[in-house]
Every structure is written in C-alpha cells, then in structure tokens.
Amino acid sequence: MKLKAKILKREDKFFKPILKGVITSLCVSLVAILLFAFILRFTSVSDSIISPVNQVIKGVAIFLGVFFGLKKVKENGIINGALIGFFFIILAFLVFSLLDGTFLFNRTLLNDIIFGTIIGAICGIICVNLKKI
C-alpha cells in the first residue's frame, strides 16, 4: 500500500507541472492570437508577417508555460520542458483546428512539433537552472 502511494505521489509530481505548463501555454497562446487577430482586423499588415508572428507567439507561450509549469521542479528541465512544448503544440493544433473547422496534417505541423519540443527543452533547461542561482 505504501509503495502504491509513493508511485502515485511520484507520478503526481511529474504530471502536474507538465499539465500546468501545457494549459498555461495554451491560454497565453489563445490570448495572444486573439490580440493579433484584433490588430490584423484594424490595420493593413502584410500577409508575410503572419507566420513569423505566429512562431513568436508559440515560442513565448511555450516559454511562459515552461516557466510557470516548472516553478517548483528542480531537475529534469530538458525532459519536462520538451514534453510541455510537444503537448502544447499537439493541443494547440487540435484547438485551433476545431475553431477553424479543418484538420490539416502536413509538413508544417511536423515542423511545429519539432520547433515546440526543442524550444520547450531549451526553456526547461533555462528555467530549472535559473532557480539554482
């Protein structure tokens, strides 16, 4: 019985920060995309700026998700950050595809998954090691 409680506690310490980070990233991303859409609606911004701004929004959302998700975590920043980035991209794809009404699996999605995982891993390393200073 005690072993089972230890395993559940260990799993809880692992899954809660990742879930918190993914949800934080998704909320930040939704708010930022809405603000950007509002700006696009009332200004004449070139179409070529949309993709880079979306990448910056994803990067900032992942950083903030990793930062707030791993606040109390002291180790495995690279793994936890990569998981937050990976699951955020998957969940964001599902949410934005549902809002758009189309699910388009293509090379861009694969690039986003790779980008999100790498950015998450880098942010995880940074956030976990910032607390040691």
Image (cartoon, helix red, strand yellow):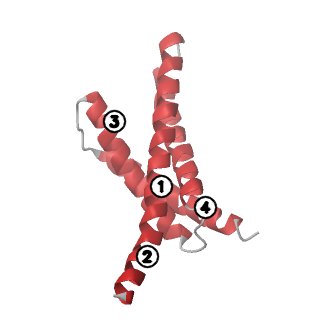
Which one is closest to the eye, mark 4 or mark 3?
4
Kind of residue at badge 4: Lys
Q: Along the polypeptide, which appears first: circle 2 or circle 3?
A: 2
- Residue 13 locus on image (x, y percent): 47, 71
Residue at image location 49% in from the left, 62% down from the top? 17
Disc assigned to residue 71: 4
- Residue 123 locus on image (x, y percent): 58, 58
Q: Is residue 70 left or right of residue 113?
A: right
* Residue at mark 3: 96
Q: Looking at the picture, does residue 17 appear above or below residue 94?
A: below
Neighbours of disc 3 within 10 Å: few (<14), some (14-19), many (20+):
few
Q: Along the polypeptide, which appears first: circle 2 or circle 4?
A: 2
Q: Along the polypeptide, which appears first: circle 1 or circle 3?
A: 1
Which one is closest to the eye, mark 2 or mark 4?
2
Kind of residue at badge 2: Lys
Q: Along the polypeptide, which appears first: circle 4 or circle 3?
A: 4
Q: CA distance from mark 1 to mark 4?
A: 10 Å
Q: CA distance from mark 1 to mark 3?
A: 19 Å
Can residue 22 be spotted in the picture? yes
Residue at image location 33% in from the left, 46% down from the top? 109
Q: Looking at the picture, does residue 4 appear above or below residue 122?
A: below
Secondary structure state at the residue bearing disc 4: loop
